[in-house]
Image (cartoon, grey):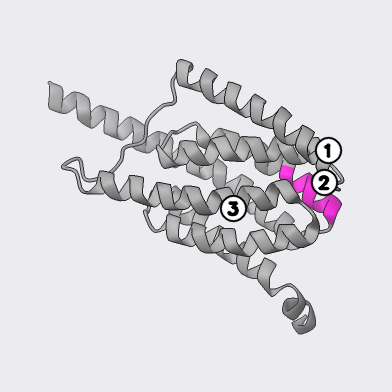
Amino acid sequence: MIDWLSANYIEVTGVILSIIYLLLSIRQSIYLWPVGLLSAVMYIVVFYEAKFYADMGLNGYYFVISIYGWINWSGANRKKASELQVVRTGVRRAMILAGAAILLFFLLGFLLDQYTDSPIPYWDALTTSGSIVATWMLTKKMLEHWLIWIFIDLVSMTLYVYRGLYPTVILFAIYTAMAVVGYIKWKRSFAKAREEKHMVEE
């Protein structure tokens, strides 16, 4: 056990940080962003060694978007409203985001298929494109980003079993369950904020 932990300490650390990140996300805590920065660094290394190049690049994106999310949530916290509120995505914005995800999927799939030795380029591209969109939605506190994560986590579990990344398989099983919890809690938060707004208006 000690030998295995010594050989896989980066992945295990990434798993622990990622679980903390998700817990903070469910609680809508701004501290999710610095934890996300550290987790991204761990997984850049893990996915490089596993030859999951899109996921490696995705974690580079996570690193950058965590900085953006941190700034965005901090800026909101300085306003009188005290914090950024959970919002619904809306049909128009959902269509734009879906279009962006589809374009990213085909672009990344082509690049991975033609220019890397990724064993499953289009599956890799599917989870990557969805994750990019979902994480951006998180920076805006859009409720429906949890639904995207549930889908991505289920697909990712299958891919990581295929590549033998078993600690990460466990992580994504936990992710799936927690994403369901996150959706329920954020939906309640949205309903509560909406109710309070109506009471103020009346």
Q: Residue furthest front?
A: 115
Badge 2 crowding class, 10 Å Cα cut-off, few under 14, some 14 to 19, many 20 or more, is some
**Residue 165 visible (yes or no):** no
**Residue 80 visible (yes or no):** yes
- Residue 173: where, in percent of width, then height? 68, 51
Q: Are marks 3 and 2 in contact (CB under 8 Å)?
A: no
Q: Compared with residue 81, is residue 90 higher up or lower down, i.e. above or below?
A: above
- Residue 21: where, in percent of width, then height? 50, 57
Q: Give the side of residue 64 with respect to residue 125, left or right.
A: left
Q: Is residue 121 magenta?
A: no
Q: Compared with residue 160, is residue 200 higher up or lower down, i.e. above or below?
A: above
Q: Disc 3 designates what residue?
A: 60
Q: Residue furthest top?
A: 92
- Residue 43: where, in percent of width, then height? 65, 60
Q: CA distance from mark 3 to mark 2?
A: 17 Å
Q: Disc 1 designates what residue?
A: 113
Q: Which residues are magenta?
A: 156-163
Secondary structure, magenta segment, majority class: helix
Q: Is residue 160 magenta?
A: yes
Q: Disc 2 designates what residue?
A: 116
SS class, disc 2: loop
